[in-house]
Amino acid sequence: MSADQLILAAAAGAVSLAISAVLWALAQRRQNQARLDELIARIRGLETRAEAATASAEAFDSALLAVEDGHALLASGEESLAICTVALGLAEAEPQTLLNALMRADPDHARRLRALFERGEPCAFEVQGPGGVVTVEGRAAGALAWLRVSGVLGEDAGLPTAPRFAAFLNARACPAWIAAADGSPVWVNAAWLKAVGAESLDEAAKRGAAFDRGADAVASEAANLGQKREAVRWLSLDGRRRAFHIVAQPLEGGGVGVWTDDVTELEELREQLKRNIEAHDQTLNRIDDAVAIFGSGRKLTFHNTAFAELWGLEPAWLEDGPTHGEVLDRLRQRRRLPETADYAKWKAAELDRYEKLGEEPDDMWSLPDGRTLRVVRQAHPLGGMVVLFSDITGELKLKTQYNAQIQVQQATLDKLSDAVAVFGSDGRLRLHNESFERFWGISHEKLEAAGDFEGVVELCVPKLHDMGFWRELKGRVADPDPSARTPMTGETRTSDDRIVEYRSRPLPDGATLIAFTDVTDARRLESALADREAALSEAERLKRDFVGNVSYELRTPLTTIIGYSELLEHSGDALPERSRGHAAAVKSAATQLARSIDDVLDMAQIDADEMALDLADVNVADLLIGVAGRWQKPAEAARVSLVIERPDDIGLIRGDAKRLGQVLDHLVENALTQTPAGGTVTLAARKALGEIQLQVSDSGRGIPFHVQAHIFDRFIGRERGGPGLGLALVKALTELHGGWVALESEPGAGARFTCHLPEGAEAVTAQRELAL
């Protein structure tokens, strides 16, 4: 290659390098310009955001301080910083000065700020200064701690902040919350959460819990109408029915504040007052007197049913509440008021009573229809007047009749043979009859002049000197103690040897009636009768003792006779057949005599009320079987069939098994004696309503009608066809069990004896008509 080519090649390479450098420089310039434009845009955005943040901070009257390593710098809000320094009484509006003042204000505030600076713990508190209140909120972001401070001066310094107000609402015992437009709560206090049983509002919302759906509806209504709404709701809270007064108030900025108060006691008192008023009105409606209540405006506020009926006024017109004057005018038009020459003056006097209500006497109104009314007026506790009208027409008639009756009583007393005097509670002599004058030998004029009890006693003492008697009688007359005025009866003797019975009786009006009766002849007759009664009682006792002693004395020889007769009867071939028959006859007669003696003794015990039943549960079927077993041989000997009839479920009866067996023994024995050979005796038992019926019937000759009335009497002679003492004992033992005996018989058709016994027998006293 030549030198020119080399030079040309070098020049071309230099030109290419220069062009490449220019092109690279242009590319770098365009890239740097784009980066510059981006940085300028970011700077402008940051400036805009900074200006917006500063403007927003200043718009909300707060200053923002950045704190790093204890040094405070103002980020925004110079005017708010100045307000805070004035509130705390600081000389300079410097961030560091303000921070130092906040640290010195309270040890607790200093502790919170150090926790913010060192550990990033958020804080919020208020500082009270001489010029106002400073609110502090602290947050940490990166290496910086940010404090937002705002000051309140003048009248607004006392207003609480949102956190303090929330704490205040949380301290309330009743629920309070802020609701949205649909009534759902967006903030609630602790009492609300406690009422619904939730830890937080979110938890309550998840469970769909609410304090009261009705309260939510009230809040929604207040939000939609933009007006305050109130309601009283009854809720079940803590297991008790409680009433809450709910107030819903729309708030500035949206939402509804709901405030509740527990008014359970107030509502219960209101309901109680309402019930009392209703009960009062019902009470007034039940009384016979007409009652009208006119309020402080003289309008009728209440009237009872008797008022409308007394005056014949229309209930609808009365319900409109006419004035007192209008009521009087309507009654005047219908001629139902007392006749008066000047009605206008009379009406004005009636209405003037509202101005001077006090203790006034009752009025008497004589109406044109002949009725007489008592009018009572009294002031009403709530203002106005209460007017009561009592129709005393019948009362006046009764007074007239009473006076006439008093005269009749006086005339009646004068016709009595007993000496009667009536003394009032003041001791004055009110009434006496002519027999009283004759009894004590006192003239009418002296008794009238005596006047009181003491004076009458002075006139009676000459014939009855016992002053203790008169003092006791005076206590019955003059002592106001009810226990001292009890009736008194007794006897005494006068100086002329008469036996006098005296009686004192308290009367309903407080008076006392005293009566004297000469019972001398009656007492003499009673003494004679008492002596005769004593003699008869002694004779009765001797008769009972005789029967008892003789019966007991006969037992010993009868036992001996029965024993020896049994020995002879079973001696075998040692005695001839005829002698053994005689021994058997002796034994039978002795046994019968022993049973008769036992019957006499049992009857004597019943007469003396000394027989006691040994009550227990008795099986009726076993009772019948036992009785049939005892009488089976005598029945076979008499060629009489002995039959038992009973249902399978006859069960038990409460009674004395021994005495019930004794009753059936007597009835079976009686039936066997009345039934000829070939006949039938039936023992039966049946259950009826609450009782067991034991029956003994036979197919014998029956009992004549004239004997049936006395069949249960004692010691009926054999010639009269009676069975003797046994049936009387049957009746007595059955009645001791609380039952009774019935007889059904026709001559020639047999007889049936039925003992009606209660299932649960109780021992009763023997009937006195069975006494010997």
Image (cartoon, rainbow, N blue to C red):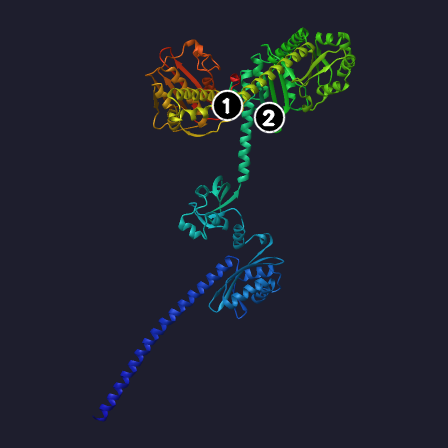
Vertical comparison of 449 with 690: above or below: above
| Residue 557 - label | 1
Work out whether 19 lies above or below 297: below
At x 76% / y 7%, what residue is drawn? 443
How crowded pointer 2 is (Cα within 10 Å; few <14, some 14-19, many 20+) is rated as few
Q: Which image quarter: residue 532? A: top right
In the image, is 18 to the left or to the right of 151? left
Asked whether residue 527 appears in the rendered view, the answer is yes
Q: Quadrant of residue 608?
A: top right
Precedes in sequence: disc 1 or disc 2: 2
Image coordinates of residue 324 in percent, x first then y, are 59, 21
The residue carrying pointer 1 sits among few (fewer than 14), some (14 to 19) or many (20 or more) residues within 10 Å by Cα, namely few
Question: As displayed, is residue 411 above or below residue 615?
Answer: above
Please provide percent x and percent y for residue 19. 29, 81
What is the secondary structure assignment of the residue under circle 2?
loop
Percent from the top left, x then y, of residue 209?
A: 42, 47
Q: Residue furthest left?
A: 1
Report the amino acid beneath label 1. Answer: Pro
Tell whether 505 sits left or right of 564: right
Q: Which mark is residue 219?
A: none
Residue sitting nearer the eye, 129 or 43: 129
Is label 1 in a helix, a strand or a loop?
Answer: helix
Q: Residue 756: in sight, yes or no?
A: no
Q: Is residue 333 left or right of residue 181?
A: right
Q: Which residue is mark 2?
A: 297
Q: Nearer the viewer, residue 713 or 381?
A: 713
